[in-house]
Structure formats: structure tokens, C-alpha cells
Image: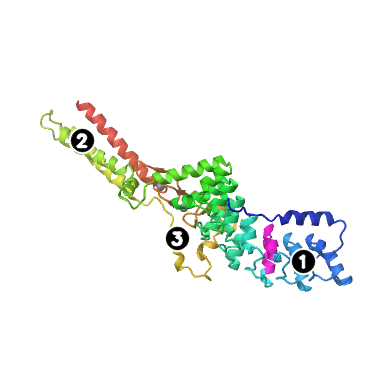
């Protein structure tokens, strides 16, 4: 494998420093980290300590305040000369640090005070990368929806936030990024896609989300060393993931191309066959039982009953056809052509302020349809659409059982009618 992502474990060291030194240090950095406004005021106003200078390790007081979401301290620091865009020796700003623990209020303050949302550190990480690295989905959502942060920007190695979320196994962040139109097939400098990275780390849930939202080609893409995600998972001894990816590829191989003749036939399912069988049986019944000349003549009452049965069966057939062809409650997809999307245009303006997202219900995001689906709606893998009040996909009616449950009642009526015919037939034979 070409190169593995080196995760900068800055938070741990930040914690260790702030924890160990808290009882000893009496400086603005510790006061900022702990949001100790009184001590901060005393240090700045009485002892004249500057807040715009970095500490011994090169980090700023504003960064410490942002890391721990100390908005009051951050506000005080900004008011007393702290630079919102000051960068440490790694090129990170206070905004980068606020993303580590998802400090939304601190980030909001920094951005309102003029922090640059697109600031990149020496690795090319923007705030969206950091949020994805630490699985801060709500934070990511906030800076993208409100401040137009780029959710699909590559770092110096060509890795997008989606690569990072996949590598670290944060399924909700992956769902959100896919919903925000992050490019699934983006290859980094090593030729790896987000799916490659999820496979390398053996993140099954991440792989599942990416595969469900993806296409067959995603599973077949090879990195610079010529390995597919399944081969990489196998190489790294992640058997479950390797099995899942191999299986997904076999399933997609079997699922015929929807545009080919065979694909179109397979998409039709069993409904047309069933419909024809019932029609043939009905015609045979009329021809060989009701209108048969060789059989004893029907009485008026029996004849009426027989024709009533034919009528019911015909109604059943019509309902069956409706059931197969009717929209089961598909939710409109939010797909749009990438070429039509302008760079400065916030993505999916209507959906982005959905209450479900504001409440952090990430499972309501469909990464395939790129919609926020209502409760009880699910994505049908056969129809490849989200269906309202989804129950299951029925191969007999070749349709989803969603909001059309009422029609299923009519289908039941059809079954009953067929049974009625059987009984009627038996009484004559
Ligand atoms: Zn869907
Ligand atoms: Zn379906």
C-alpha cells in the first residue's frame, strides 16, 4: 500500500498539556483553556499579559479557548487584541481547533469576528477536514450550511473530508458529506478513494454507507498499486469487510444493467408473469366452464354467480396492474448535475435547513437520493429510491409496499376471488 494517512493526534497532547499544567501554570493560555474569565481578566488587565502572543509550544490563547468552546474567554481575547486568523507553527487557526471537539458556539463567534473558513494548515487541512477527522458531524453541517465551507475540498495529498471520515469510520459524517455532494470517486495522490480508506481500516459501517450510495465502478477502482478496496481489506486481514465488499460486487455483477434488454426484463419482476397466468386462467374458466357446451347447463343463479366471479377477478386484475405500476410513495430525488452547480452556490439550499438535520438526525439522510427523508421512509435497493412509509419490496407485484398498502388490500381481494373460482370449479367437477 502506498501510504497510510498519518493522523495527527494533537488533541491528546493538547489535553495532556492543559491537564498537567493547569494546577501549576498561571497564564492566559490555561485561563483561556478552562474558560476562567476572572483569572484571564486579572492577567491581562492587572499583570499586562498579552493575548496575541503564542505560548511556548507556539499555540495561541484563542486556540485553547476555541478547543474547549469557551466563548466568553474567546470573546474577551478577541476584544483584547487576539487575532482570529493567527496561525500556529502547523498553520492551524483557532477555527481549526474549534472543529476538534465540535465547538459550534466558539466557531460561530470566530467566524462572525472574521475568521477565514477556508484557511488551510501546512497539510492543506481546512476546518471541514478537521471536523471529518474527529467525526464532528453537527459542526460540519453548521459551517457548511451557514458559512459555505467547502465540504469536498482536497488537502495537500488530494484527500477530501470524505476520505477522512471514511478512514476514521464516522458513518454519520460520511452520510452528511455524501448528501452534500462530496465526490465518492475522488482519488488521492495514492489513487485511493474514500472506499479504499474505509477498507484499509476495516470500517464496515463506513463501507456499507459508501457502497449503498455508490455504483459498481467504486468497487472496481484500483489504487496506484493496482488494488481494489476488497483486495486492500483482505490484505489488511479485515475479513468481514473483504467478504462484504466481495459480496457487494457479486450482487452488483448479477444485477443486470438497467439499460440492457435482460436488465429491463429483470426489473419488471414477477408481476407480468403472474398477471398473464391469472388472465389465461380467467379466459380458460369462461371458455371451459361458463360457456362450455359439453357441460350441464348452468342455472340462472349459478350463471349469475359465475359471471359475478369473472367481474371480481377482472377488477382484481385491474387493481393488480395499478398496484404494480403505481408510485408507491417515492420521494423526489435531489440529484443535480454537477456541471450545473456553480462554485459559489450553497448546495441544496432547500434541504440544508431541514429541521431533522438541525436536530442532528443524520440517519434520516439518504446518501443515494441526497434527500432528508421523513420518518418511516427507507431507501429501497431494488427501486433505488426512497419510499415513504416503506414496508418491503414485493417481487410479486414488482413494486415497493409503501403508501400503496391500500392497494394491497385490493390484491388480497384478487386472491380471494381466485380462491372463489377454485371453489366454484370444484363444485362443478
Ligand atoms: Zn434513497
Ligand atoms: Zn422497491
Q: Which mark is residue 306?
A: 2
Classify the position of the C terminus by image quarter. Answer: top left
| Image coordinates for residue 84, horizontal then vertical, percent | 71, 70
Q: Relative to 269, is 83 on the left or the right?
A: right
Farthest residue toward the left?
293
**Residue tagged by mark 3?**
335
- Residue 110 sits above or below residue 369 on the image: below
For residue 342: magenta?
no
Q: Is there any visible trace of residue 266 in the rendered image?
A: yes
**Dot in front, 3 or 2:** 3
Range of the magenta residues?
A: 95-110
Q: Are marks 1 and 2 in contact (CB under 8 Å)?
A: no
Q: Residues within 10 Å of mark 1 (few under 14, many from 20)?
A: many
**Residue tagged by mark 1?**
60
Q: Quadrant of residue 164?
A: bottom right
Q: Earlier in the sequence, mark 3 or mark 1?
A: 1
Q: Quadrant of residue 42?
A: bottom right
Q: Residues within 10 Å of mark 3 (few under 14, many from 20)?
A: few
* Mark 3, secondary structure of its residue: loop
On whether ligand 1 comes within 8 Å of the CB at mark 3, the answer is no
**Dot in front, 3 or 1:** 1
Farthest residue toward the right?
47
* Mark 2, secondary structure of its residue: helix
Question: Which residue does the image show at 65% across and 68% down from the upper left?
Answer: 119
Q: Earlier in the sequence, mark 1 or mark 2?
A: 1
- Residue 239 sits above or below residue 11 on the image: above
Q: Residues within 10 Å of mark 2 (few under 14, many from 20)?
A: many
Amino acid at each position: 500500500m502506498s501510504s497510510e494517512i498519518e493522523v495527527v493526534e494533537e488533541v491528546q497532547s493538547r489535553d495532556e498539556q492543559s491537564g498537567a499544567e493547569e494546577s501549576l501554570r498561571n497564564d492566559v493560555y490555561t485561563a483561556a483553556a478552562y474558560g476562567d474569565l476572572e483569572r484571564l481578566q486579572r492577567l491581562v488587565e492587572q499583570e499586562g499579559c498579552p493575548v496575541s502572543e503564542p505560548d511556548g509550544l507556539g499555540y495561541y490563547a484563542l486556540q485553547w479557548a476555541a478547543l474547549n468552546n469557551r466563548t466568553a474567554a474567546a470573546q474577551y481575547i478577541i476584544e483584547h487584541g487576539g487575532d482570529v486568523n493567527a496561525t500556529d507553527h502547523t498553520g492551524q487557526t483557532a477555527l481549526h481547533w474549534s472543529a476538534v471537539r465540535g465547538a459550534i458556539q466558539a466557531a460561530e463567534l470566530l467566524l462572525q469576528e472574521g475568521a477565514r473558513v477556508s484557511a488551510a494548515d501546512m497539510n492543506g487541512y481546512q476546518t471541514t477536514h478537521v471536523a471529518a477527522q474527529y467525526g464532528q458531524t453537527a459542526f460540519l453541517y453548521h459551517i457548511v450550511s451557514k458559512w459555505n465551507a467547502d465540504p469536498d475540498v482536497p488537502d495537500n495529498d488530494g484527500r477530501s473530508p470524505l476520505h477522512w471520515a471514511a478512514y476514521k469510520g464516522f458513518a454519520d459524517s460520511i452520510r452528511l458529506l455524501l448528501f452534500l455532494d462530496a465526490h465518492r470517486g475522488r482519488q488521492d495522490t495514492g489513487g485511493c478513494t474514500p472506499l479504499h480508506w474505509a477498507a484499509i481500516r476495516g470500517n464496515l459501517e463506513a463501507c456499507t454507507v459508501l457502497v449503498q450510495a455508490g455504483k459498481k465502478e467504486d468497487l472496481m477502482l484500483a489504487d496506484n498499486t493496482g488494488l481494489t478496496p476488497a483486495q486492500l481489506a483482505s490484505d489488511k486481514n479485515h475479513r468481514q469487510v473483504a467478504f462484504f465488499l466481495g459480496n457487494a460486487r457479486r450482487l452488483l455483477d448479477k444485477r443486470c444493467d438497467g439499460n440492457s434488454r435482460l436488465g429491463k426484463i429483470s426489473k419488471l419482476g414477477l408481476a407480468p408473469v403472474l398477471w398473464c397466468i391469472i388472465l389465461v386462467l380467467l379466459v380458460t374458466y369462461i371458455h371451459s366452464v361458463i360457456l362450455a357446451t359439453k357441460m350441464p347447463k348452468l342455472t340462472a343463479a349459478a350463471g349469475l354467480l359465475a359471471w359475478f366471479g369473472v367481474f371480481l377477478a377482472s377488477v382484481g386484475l385491474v387493481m393488480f396492474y395499478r398496484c404494480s405500476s403505481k408510485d408507491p410513495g417515492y420521494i423526489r430525488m435531489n440529484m443535480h448535475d454537477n456541471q450545473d452547480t456553480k462554485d459559489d452556490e450553497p448546495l441544496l439550499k432547500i434541504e440544508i435547513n431541514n429541521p431533522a438535520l438541525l436536530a442532528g438526525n443524520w440517519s434520516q439522510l439518504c446518501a443515494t437520493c441526497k434527500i432528508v427523508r421523513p420518518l418511516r421512509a427507507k431507501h429501497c435497493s431494488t427501486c433505488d429510491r426512497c419510499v415513504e412509509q416503506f414496508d418491503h419490496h414485493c417481487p410479486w407485484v414488482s413494486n415497493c409496499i409503501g403508501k400503496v398498502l391500500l392497494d394491497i388490500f385490493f390484491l388480497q381481494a384478487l386472491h380471494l376471488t381466485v380462491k372463489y373460482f377454485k371453489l366454484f370449479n370444484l363444485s362443478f367437477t
